[in-house]
Image (cartoon, rainbow, N blue to C red):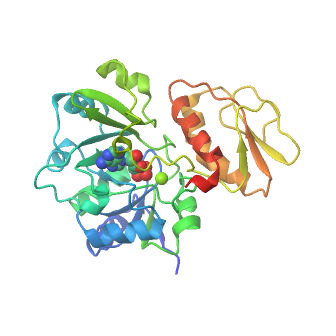
Amino acid sequence: MTAPVLSGEDPAAIRAAASLLRDGGLVAMPTETVYGLAADATSGAAVAALYAAKGRPKFNPLIAHVTGTGMAEALAVFTPLARKLAAAFWPGPLTLVLPRTTDCPVSELACAGLETLAVRAPAHPVAQALIQAFGGPLVAPSANPSGGVSPTQAGHVAAGLGERIGLILDGGPCRVGVESTVIGFDGNTPLLLRKGGLAREAIEAITGPLSAPDAASPKASPGMLQSHYAPRARLRLNAVAPEKGEAFLGFGTSKIADRNLSPDGDLQEAAANLFAFLRELDAGAVAGIAVAPIPDEGLGEAINDRLQRAAAPRDIA
Ligand code: AMP
Ligand code: MG
């Protein structure tokens, strides 16, 4: 049986979803970044069921979603800098990786055995309502089979995971469209662990220059697989024009495009369209998808990161 899709604006649907989560079930919820597959973060059984439904490797830790800093501070140890970032950007597309509190109730499986926990307060009203109604943290990786293109509409979730989960809350298309930016810390030095929906420049205005994680300590950024977000068709990046058999994903003034991420060259609009357009072109049984160059600034950094992973050889993952 495929999961029912209910409007996230209906309070009865939120109550039903919270009750399903209390019973260890899996609920897809809209966030402003992408749709997440939510489970009770404190239940080892629910978290194990989530990894199984997605086919997600167990070394790839999950983000605990909270209503705000009140709930987050019971789970993770905040430094003054982490508090400053949360005050500036929560609720929003920023994830902070911090040490677990000594009595952190989040399942160790969710943290892949690390002593740190990733926390985020999502800005979508439906996600906020669900966490509130549930009354505790929810882990919520993207609601798609592991390795595939992330869902930015309820229909994408139904197509990929409909048979494996309990309920889908529909909150319309995601406003940001790419996953959250993940920031970790080496002492007081902030590290950019994953480029995402909050632009580096906005964070650096508060922290100063962000460092890259030390390549010698892969534990700082586990789960960042080289092949990810991959459609069926092969991707060719920085293309000026399509070759035979290819669809063309344009940006800015491209005239020949089958889809244009943003005719005005607006990187926010491009991020919001990215995953839906990749899915649409992939559904057209094309041999490949050629993608126009995207400026590597602002949200363009996250778009290029996702495109590079989508284009990476598949045998690595
Ligand atoms: P997602 O797959 O979008 O739910 O994002 C989860 C990502 O957050 C993982 O793939 C990691 O890159 C990052 N992450 C989660 N927990 C941690 C952690 N404890 N330490 C470092 N990175 C983490
Ligand atoms: Mg994902």
Residue 47 placement (x, y as % from top left) = 32, 66
Residue 68 placed where, x, y %? 23, 44
- Residue at the limit of the structure toward the left, as seen here: 103
Q: Is residue 123 left or right of residue 161?
A: left
Rendered residue at 36%/61% (across/down): 38
Judge left or right: residue 71 versus residue 158. Answer: left
**Quadrant assignment for the C terminus:** bottom right
- Residue 6's image quarter? bottom left
Nearest to the observer: residue 116 or residue 3: 116
Q: Furthest-front residue in view?
A: 216
Residue depicted at 70% across the width and 27% down the height: 252
Q: How many marks?
A: 0
**Residue 39 spot, x, y in % from top left:** 33, 64
Q: Where is 188 relative to 111, above or below?
A: above
Residue 155 image offset from top left, x and y in percent: 57, 61
Residue at the image position 42 percent from the left and 73 percent from the top: 166
Whether residue 219 is visible, yes or no, is yes
Residue 302 left/right relative to 186: right
Q: Outermost residue, bottom direction?
A: 1
In this view, the residue in front, 25 or 233, is: 233
Is residue 26 in view from this perspective?
no
